[in-house]
Amino acid sequence: MRNLDEQLREIHTRSEKLKKARRDRRALALGGSLSCTCLVLIVIVSLSLPSFSDAAAAQNSRYGSLILSAPYLGYVIIGVLAFLLGICVTLLCVHLARRGREAEDL
């Protein structure tokens, strides 16, 4: 039979495990939702952009930068969103791998 100190320690340990599991679920849900959001934004922005041929015909090479011109700004935004999507997916995979190793240790 356990004494009171051992019972309290076990309750505290279980409570910490439940809190950690809740944090892990929230982090997983957040990572998944951010990945989906980035993917949806990439698709929406890419569908709303004009084609390269139209932009190249309208581009005047004497003025401004090619990247900062209006037709190409959307492609820069898509690149940034794709980079953010890569970060989200990488963090999600790292989190899942760490969670899998912790499950093996138990």
Image: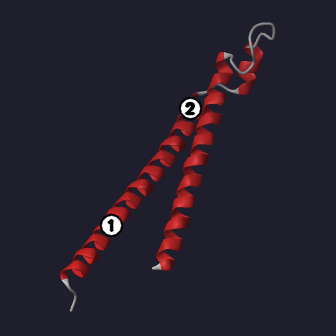
**In the rendered image of this protein, does residue 33 appear above or below residue 101?**
above
Comparing 5 with 74, the one in front is: 5
| Amino acid beneath label 1 | Glu
Residue holding disc 1: 16
Residue farthest to the bottom? 1
Q: Residue at x 53, y 72 (%)?
A: 101
Q: CA distance from mark 1 to mark 2?
A: 43 Å
Image quarter of the N terminus:
bottom left
Residue farthest to the right? 61
Location of residue 71 in the rendering, given as x and y in whole percent from the top left corner: 66, 20
Mark identifier at residue 45? 2
Q: Quadrant of residue 9?
A: bottom left
Decide which of tag 1 and tag 2 comes sooner along the chain.
1
Determine crowd level at label 2: few under 14, some 14-19, many 20+ residues with C-alpha closer than 10 A.
some
Q: Quadrant of residue 2?
A: bottom left
Q: Please state which of the two labelled residues, at mark 1 or mark 2, is closer to the viewer.
A: 1
Location of residue 35 in the rendering, given as x and y in whole percent from the top left corner: 51, 48
Q: Quadrant of residue 84?
A: top right
Q: Residue at x 63, y 41 (%)?
A: 83
Q: Residue at x 81, y 7 (%)?
A: 62
Comparing 25 with 8, the one in front is: 8
